[in-house]
Image: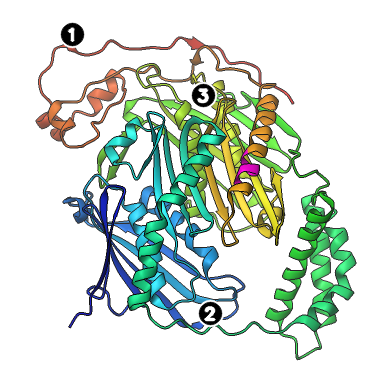
Amino acid sequence: MFDIHTKEIVWGGRTLTLETGRIARQADGAVLATYGATTVLCTAVAQRQPREGVDFFPLTVNYQEKAFAAGKIPGGFFKREGRPSEKETLSSRIIDRSIRPLFASGFRNETQVICTVLAHDLENDPDVVALVGSSAALAISGIPFNGPVGCARVGFIDGEYVLNPLLRQMSDSRLDLVVAGRSDAVMMVESEAQELSEDDMLGAVMFAQQEFQPVIAAISDLAATCGRDPWRVPEPEDTGDLESAVRNLVGEDLANAYKEADKQARQEKLQAVRATVREHFAKDESVTGDTLAGVLKSLEKATMRDATLTSGVRVDGRQTSTVRPISSQVGILERSHGSSLFTRGETQALVTVTLGTGQDEQVMDALAGEYREHFMLHYNFPPYSVGEASFLRSPGRREIGHGKLAWRAIHPLLPEKEKFPYTVRVVSEITESNGSSSMATVCGSSLALMDAGVPLARPCAGIAMGLIKEGDRFVVLSDILGDEDHLGDMDFKVAGTGNGVTSLQMDIKIAGITREIMSVALEQAREGRLHILGEMASAIGSTHDTATSYARPATRYRTSRRASRRSRFPPTGFATSSDRVARSSARSRRSAEPRSMSRMMEPSRLPPRTRRQPTRP
């Protein structure tokens, strides 16, 4: 009944097993990936016909954690899994970003990858296992995928890189880095670090690429044994004559449009060019609208890239390493505990900080156990920020991912809860956007936190780097615009302090980048980051000595031993005496044990301060 194929290797001191042929046999590709005792079922399915009317690859990745994987029953009234958690959303994004660039050019078939966590040993994080399983499922499916892809997590403990550290080891690690790539190039990077140097970060990425080579070899062997016949991808339509006609018609106008520094003026000129092309070919029945749009998009891309590669001058007239003009202001909202307005070119973030008590901590119900989060950072991207009118929806994957990237940049710099007994919520409202709004959030968050009196170790700034690569020629761009992100080959975000990197994220649109490109990008990002930190210091150089008078005083509270044993991560926090009374529900009365007032910690209050006048640019 079952035609089972298995590939097994020892990787990072544990056994990695890839099995296919027993479960989900009707999927195009299905692999049961097991690492240690963590098991993830990964499936890949694609429609047989292209999706009409789209000029992008319709790929969907869903990573889902089942409560039974850790021997738990979901909470809530319905007792079943609900909307995706933050962890599930972020893991879905990591997988998507790693595999999307490797599908065949012009492939427009609806494709879905689903990763279901079936077992979690509370030692090996399922996200890396899911990415490995997804790569294997695609490799054996016959879907036109130019893989396989390997993946690894890297820690940095006692000055040494550690491959796939256990969950309990992560508390001792100065680095949490996930890298995906092919045998010859890196595809995706996601990390949080405690102010590591650029050399340490680059070394970690290269270490990961070296260590996941056995995984790539194992997937290749599995595909050679049981892979399906590859799908035939239709040859792209020959549009050479049409491209020449469009270039002769509007080539000069396109070049002039991409010399316009102002975003809105540039868009108006581009719209005029597109209208001219559509009008010119309106009566030509041999030219379809989709074909014409594809040719025009290709010409726009080539125009911008060629100009930058040849002259070194960018769309807005800057040199490749120049950062846009910066304005930093703090204390602009009277009743907010902390606020800032960070503007870089045509990208702007209005950031606020709210200080709360332990009662405001977010309870996180994860597979690895329940814990409390006392630092939250939320990123919002309203449509008016790009001059559009559309529905306001709840935060999507992009908003969650950008917020988490900024969270990772700031988190290593926060004080210990014993030294600053507040729950902290940061909200970033993107009010203007033309590239790198997540890095504007990092800068604005650092300013707002210092304005609120949160004692950050050091100010933090972020910068987004871009890449244009044609053959052996390449140029790295600092502080990229939206058009450079859209038409370029890489979005490489680096955040940190003057002492080192705290967060790094890389997405690419080509089949991998080399060590040389990463090294150039990291060094150029360091120079840009130091420049931005200098500009930010004009608004506020260090944290204010006291918290705002509008913040509630914070008081520590103890949690009973019985309640603490419910989780691998004992809940801790701060609350006022009135908050403790409000929490005295039937459940807490059953679990709480008697304790004297002498055993409770004394209230820790920060002296109030008067509001300052807002800084002016």
- Counting residues from the start of the chain, the first of labels 1 and 3 encountered is 3
Q: Which residue is mark 3?
A: 337
The amino acid pointed to by label 1 is Ser
Image quadrant in which you'd find residue 363:
top left
Q: Amino acid at mark 3?
A: His
Q: Residues within 10 Å of mark 3 (few under 14, many from 20)?
A: many
**Which tag, 1 or 2, sits closer to the chain's start?**
2
Residue shown at 80%/89% (left/top)? Answer: 284
Real-space CA distance between mark 1 and mark 2, rounded to the nearest whole angstrom: 69 Å
Along the line of sight, the residue nearer the viewer: 581 or 111 = 111
Residue type indicated by callout 2: Arg
Q: Quadrant of the C terminus?
A: top right
Q: In what element is the residue under mark 3?
A: loop
Most prominent secondary structure in the magenta stretch? helix
Does 580 sit left or right of 277 as displayed? left
- Give residue 186's position: percent from left, percent from top: 52, 54
In the image, residue 466 lies in the stretch drawn in magenta: no
Mark 2, residue position = 51
Residues shaded magenta: 518-522
Horizontal relation, residue 615 to residue 250: left or right: left
Q: Position of residue 171 (x, y in %)?
A: 33, 32
Nearer the viewer's eye, disc 1 or disc 2?
2
In the image, residue 177 lies at what x, y percent?
44, 43
Q: Are marks 2 and 3 in contact (CB under 8 Å)?
A: no
Identify the residue at image location x=89%, y=75%: 248
Q: Which residue is mark 1?
A: 598
Q: CA distance from mark 1 to mark 3?
A: 32 Å
